[in-house]
Amino acid sequence: MDIRRTRIRDLRKALDTKHISATELCSEYFSRIEAVDGRLQSYITVTKEKAFEMAAEAQKLIDSGKGTELTGIPIAVKDNICTDGVKTTCSSRMLENFVPPYDATVIENLKREGYVLLGKTSMDEFAMGGSNQTSAFAKTRNPYNLERVPGGSSGGSAAAVAASLAPCALGSDTGGSIRQPAAFCGVTGIKPTYGRVSRYGLVAFASSLDQIGPIANSAEDCAILLNTLCSHDEHDATSSRVAVPDFTERLGQPINGMKIAMPKEFFADEVDNEVREAVLEAARSLEAKGAKLVECSMPSLKYAIPAYYLIACAEAASNLSRFDGIKYGYRGEGATFEELIRDSRTKGFGEEVKRRILLGNYALSSGYYDAYYKKALALKQEIIKEYNELYDTADVILTPTAPTVAYKIGAQDNDPVKMYLADICTVTVNIAGLPAINTTCGYDKAGMPIGMSLVGKRFDETTILQLADAFEREFTPVLPKL
Amino acid sequence: MRYYPTMGLEIHAELLTKSKVFCSCSAEFGGEPNTRCCPVCSGLPGTLPVLNRRAVEYIIKAGYVMNCDISRFTKWDRKNYFYPDLPKAYQISQMPRPVCLDGHVDIKVNDEDKTIRINRIHLEEDAGKLTHEGRISLADYNRCGIPLIEIVTEPDFHSAEEVVAFFEKIKLLLLYAGICDCKMEQGSIRCDVNISIAPEGSEQLGTRTELKNLNSLKAIAKAIEAEIARQAEMLDNGGEIVQETRRFNEAAMETLAMRSKEDAHDYRYFPDPDIPPIIFTEEELADIRATLPEMPEQRMARYRTAYGISENDAVIIVSDKRVSDFFDEAVDGCKSPKNVASYLVGEFMRRVNLGEIDLDVLKFSGKDFARLVEYLYSDKLSQNNAKLILGEMAQHGGSPETIADEQELWIKEDTEQLSAVIDEIIASNPKASEQYRSGDQKVFGFFMGQANKALKGAASPKAIQEQLIAKLRR
Amino acid sequence: MELKTIQHLCELSKLNYDDEALEKVASEMTDIISLMDGIKEFDLSYDDTKDNNSISFGEVREDIVKPSFSPEKLMQNAKSVDDCYVVPKVVD
């Protein structure tokens, strides 16, 4: 069976009609992983043995007619989502040998469906970065050009899906970490509304911004995965009680009359011409299908980067304090607790993680709190207000996902400021807790994918899925040559 | 120079919830190391705290009994510091929006009434336990996540006596409200004292020190006295008080500076993004308030008005909730609560103080006690035999009836036996009988004693007296 | 960024840098903070009661005890003695 960019519904059909067994399907993916991942470096851990056990179990369910949507479907999981008995490293030396004693809620949800775990995918260390180059282990490459970055922080998941080393994957998104790598790797990825998916078991980067979501070959596949991932969870007090719809219900319905706002700040000079043109072209094609384009503005965007980094790093500094070498993780040396904790953290964390911890502690420390952290919270309220105003006249907001296509490995090394500025298109969505989906809208002259983002109202994933799906139906993706 | 001390308290009390404050592990005291733990309270990566409703209910109750305003909007913050008993390296606590604000509690010291203002009460989590073993320490997280309330007073105390009286009052309120067991020896209630002194008459407060880890009432009083003396000596010698945390060495009766946990006490408080703030409705608060049990002052009033008990007795009864609960059980349906109260305050409390009665493991019920008192006051038992029976009940349990039956302790209305015994006593003491008849009333006591001895409580003192008088006069 | 400030941040963060690395990170932090300083011109104040993330009291978890983990499983990543975490000497 050809598994290149094969959609979940086709895999489902093949499994249900016994065209292929769950185990055979699994083997297909492992063959590709073995052939390709040496160059691509998308996985940190491949769980082959476990996968075959899970596939055998899934096959039993299918054979007894108890199979559901994801039974026997192989899935790759970002390595910051805890898997009971399977190493979860966050691409950090700190957690190199960490084996969680429990499953994240999303993993429990998937297990209930009888999914098959292919392995854990590489990422930027503790999800801090947009290139996968801050990983302490596998530094993933872009399937479209191995000299370029796959994006990040869910770069391993996006690259694995793009290269067909998994039909779909889980990522996490704190400031664009699902959407931007999906854009760089030419696949579809959705960050759900904050609270839609339980964060229990997701190793926290910034708790008020983090959200787990799927990366897949299509909006439809994302919708199918969301149906299983979303649930109210008693282990996560921030998980929402809003009813979970069938996310596939509006796929294929006409989009005429839908109002799409395009805040002009997102199309400013910082955005590459080719990117801007591709997104505008996509907007015109949606217009041709009946959507209405609305011009608008989002003045607070100019403060978005500091607001985002202050909030995210303040929370991260606190969240990452628990790594002291005592309970788990890299245990350094030292005759006293103080020495041990300093040595463990100094050797366990990479440079970017340390910078963000320092920045976070700066923002929270006495004398700076009001000027930085509290100001960032004020901006969060302002950004939410501006989004709400935009949604008074629009159903969806359309922006580029990133100002550029995937850049060359090393291009942003040693320049944190440049790295941070590159997140401008995605961070406000996390600050406002909104759902947003990336889908491919074109390729640049060098053949690198260009992504656009559709941002929805809170808890309105259905509309952006419908719109992305409508676009994808008439868009032919180019596959990477791997 | 004479100095005037000023003190404020921070009281930590563990709440009697079933589960911990942010996870579902048991909140019971003790247990084998790390057996009451889960990924959440052990601070594993990826875990999230989920607030316990009962803990919130209990702090609201604490707020009401201490006359606080209950915030309609409350939220939680992270207090960040590194210590191996704190697995997340932050304590979930409350900073700008505590549940309770601006309360007050009345105390009585040396017969004078005084009001202590409460600044705030907030809800937080307890830390784990470290055992130091030479070059290493062992960490047990069973206590991590036990809900704690921190009661912060205004600096309204000026003597150790006031502090002790207040602390006892708080214990009483928490016990009556049913939200803390107040077992100091298990650390379920702890007290830190902020203390400063200033020359008498001075308007300005001195630099304060904080006394930590005071684990008994005695230690609180002694530590305060020691610290006041230390500060006074320091100032007298021209020294300066350093703002620092000190602990009390009970053996040496002195306070010692603790090396601070963090060079800079910069806790970097910020709102915990994992715990949504709560908004209470008036109805929810009213419902919680309605579940408050009768508090000591209300009980006092009831004892005085409904039962006519003296203020003194009522104070003694309510000042220990166990005694008061026992009394309430005893007088339920009882005809003479006043008699029960006086026997309780007298004989019962005497045995409690002697350690003969353990209030935590009572072997008899209030009803048993009430019937014993009833028998005593209706001349069915003699004073002595009633005491004897109470002693027996305290030691082995059992009903007063069974004990009286078995040991034949009842007063008998058998006048023949009484008559015979008295006849014999008179007959064998002719000289004394003559004395009485010639008007010497003093010997009557001798006859009473002889008769009591011979009858062993089998007749009531009244009956003995009547018979004796009748027969001696004959 | 002043040396004193970065040293204080390292203390709060429990991170060690040798002199050379400290100088480098101080210079990076200076750049990062000047990026963050952009926020200073924004002049609205924060009102925490207007964050739309509160829940009602009824949504708060009920007080029910659930089984804890076994120490073996819970501490599978830790150095332990007698089911306790081993901590080097705490100086306080």
Image (cartoon, helix red, strand yellow):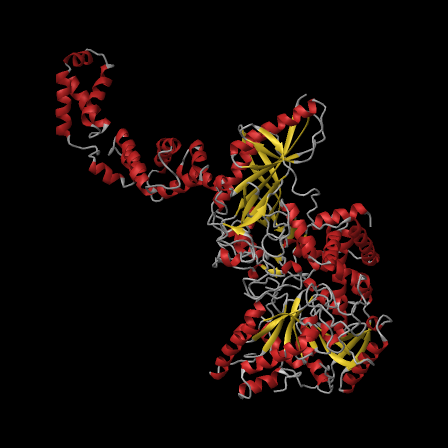
Quadrant in the rendering for residue A47 = bottom right
Q: What percent of the width, then of the height, locates residue B294?
A: 47, 45
Q: Nearer the viewer, residue B399 or A424?
A: A424
Please say whether residue B10 is visible from this viewpoint: yes
Rendered view: A68 above or below A431: below
Please say whether residue A367 is visible from this viewpoint: no
Quadrant in the rendering for residue B442 = top left
Task: Give the position of the C terminus of chain A as an image quadrant.
Answer: bottom right
Q: What percent of the width, then of the height, locates residue A206?
A: 68, 61
Taking A457 as reference, is A329 left or right?
A: left
Taking A312 as reference, is B293 left or right?
A: left
| Residue found at x 72% / y 31% | B204
Taking A386 as reference, is A337 left or right?
A: left
Q: What percent of the width, then of the height, locates residue A181?
A: 72, 72
Rendered view: A14 above or below B166: below
Q: What percent of the width, then of the height, locates residue B104?
A: 59, 40
Q: Nearer the viewer, residue B103 or A414?
A: A414
Rendered view: A30 above or below B413: below
Quadrant in the rendering for residue A477 = bottom right
